[in-house]
Amino acid sequence: MILHTIIDLSEVMASPQDISYEYKQIGSCMLQGTNCKEGFMVDRIISTNPSDYLNPKYQIGKFLK
């Protein structure tokens, strides 16, 4: 089977208990990510507002402090 995805293969094949995501509410935007020593790393944006996806502060891979 061929799997075409933009998601990292380790995330696709990992069991749900291997990944521990946290969620942060900032205004009307919900961010999914992980806490690192650099801060909160954004993995996913959950919002109904299209401008949240265009906000450079919430880009995937950015660190929030």
Image (tube, rainbow, N blue to C red):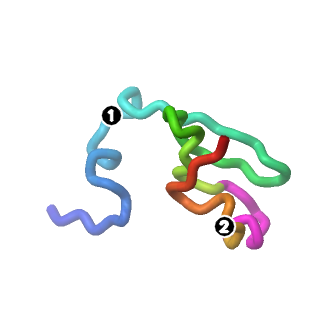
Helix, strand or loop at label 2? It is: helix
Query: Which residue does the numbered mark 1 point to in the structure image?
Result: 15
In-image side of 33 versus 55 (left or right): left
Q: Residue at x 78, y 66 (%)?
A: 49
Farthest residue, direction left: 1
Q: Position of residue 46 (x, y in %)?
A: 67, 55
Residue span colored magenta: 46-53
Q: Position of residue 1 (x, y in %)?
A: 15, 62
Q: Nearer the viewer, residue 47 or 34?
A: 34
| Number of callouts | 2
Q: Residue at x 54, y 59 (%)?
A: 60
Q: Nearer the viewer, residue 3 or 33?
A: 33
Report the Cα–Cα distance between label 2 and label 1: 31 Å
Mark 2: few, some, or many residues within 10 Å (few <14, many ≥20)? few
Q: Residue at x 69, y 72 (%)?
A: 54
Mark 1: few, some, or many residues within 10 Å (few <14, many ≥20)? few
Query: Which residue does the numbered mark 2 point to in the structure image?
Result: 56
- The disc labelled 1 sits on which kind of residue? Ser
Q: Find out whether residue 15 is within the magenta segment.
A: no
